Amino acid sequence: MRKILGCVRRAANDYNMIQEGDRIAVGLSGGKDSIALLTALKLYQRFTPTPFELCAIMIDMGLKDTDMGEMDALMKYCESLQAPLHIERTNIAEIIFDIRKESNPCSLCSKMRRGALNTVCNRLGYNKLALAHNSEDVLETFLLSFLYEGRLSTFQPVSHMSRTDITLIRPLLYAEEGDIKGAARRLHFPIVHNPCPKNHFTQREYMKNLVNMIKKDIPFAKDRMFEAIVNADRYNLFPQKHQHKKQEFYDDQRKS
């Protein structure tokens, strides 16, 4: 966990993610990434001079095939970390799969789970929500926006949601998925396997496989793409249409 903790410390410092008195809730899915985030933030809490509170929030979507033995192990793990775990029961799965019968449910599911997390944060008085997106997630989100939406965009390290007054932070954004997998294996994370029928059959999974294919031919490609996203001085895109005409107008105005 030392390397992951270093990534969390770097992200927190680079983007001023954590301030004194913050009450931070980790969105805990039961996967390796969110467990790694909770573990790393708990370690960071012990070493940082900036005091903050920490808990975990898990959204129960109502999927029938959830392994309750795995859930019990996860709850015991949170107890061992002294990180309170709040489980919010919802009917998200019923709405998506039974009522709306979504063929591509991931976007709606993400919005509904995020909304539920924000609601619990407000109810419990937590001002920040920590999500476990790692460096691969940064690239996958960028490629999804680029290829499917025609936008050059990815999620922000820190973003404030004015409607709920919750600030989203992503302390794992510098962490490598391989390091997280290694930590999960060495520390025996109590992973709760995802029972969603669309798991591993999503556009994001396709992007993950695409990045892995590129890395086979260009081993350093992932690092270069990530650096291009996080370093604004490497941007070299087209100017806004007709911007050169506007500049000529301003130049003429100054001369006159």
Image (cartoon, rainbow, N blue to C red):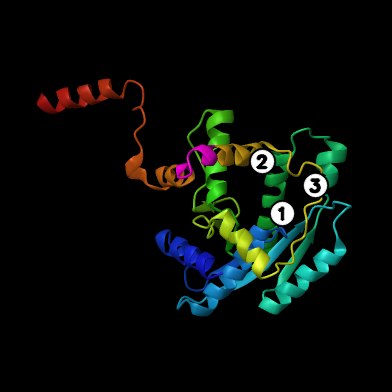
Q: Which residue is mark 2?
A: 205
Q: CA distance from mark 1 to mark 2?
A: 24 Å
Q: Is residue 250 left or right of residue 76?
A: left
Q: Secondary structure at mark 3?
A: loop
- Quadrant where the C terminus sits is top left
Q: Amino acid at mark 2?
A: Glu
Is residue 67 or residue 86 the one in the foreground? 67
Please tell me which residue is depicted at 59% across the width and 36% down the height of the picture: 210
Q: Position of residue 92 (x, y in %)?
A: 80, 48
Please tell me which residue is depicted at 53% across the width and 37% down the height of the picture: 214
Residue 84 against residue 35 in the figure, above or below: below
Q: Secondary structure at mark 1?
A: helix
Q: Which residue is mark 1?
A: 116
Nearer the observer: mark 3 or 1; the answer is 3
Q: Which residue is mark 3?
A: 196
Is residue 181 or residue 55 the one in the foreground? 181
Q: Earlier in the sequence, mark 3 or mark 1?
A: 1
Is residue 227 or residue 17 the one in the foreground? 227
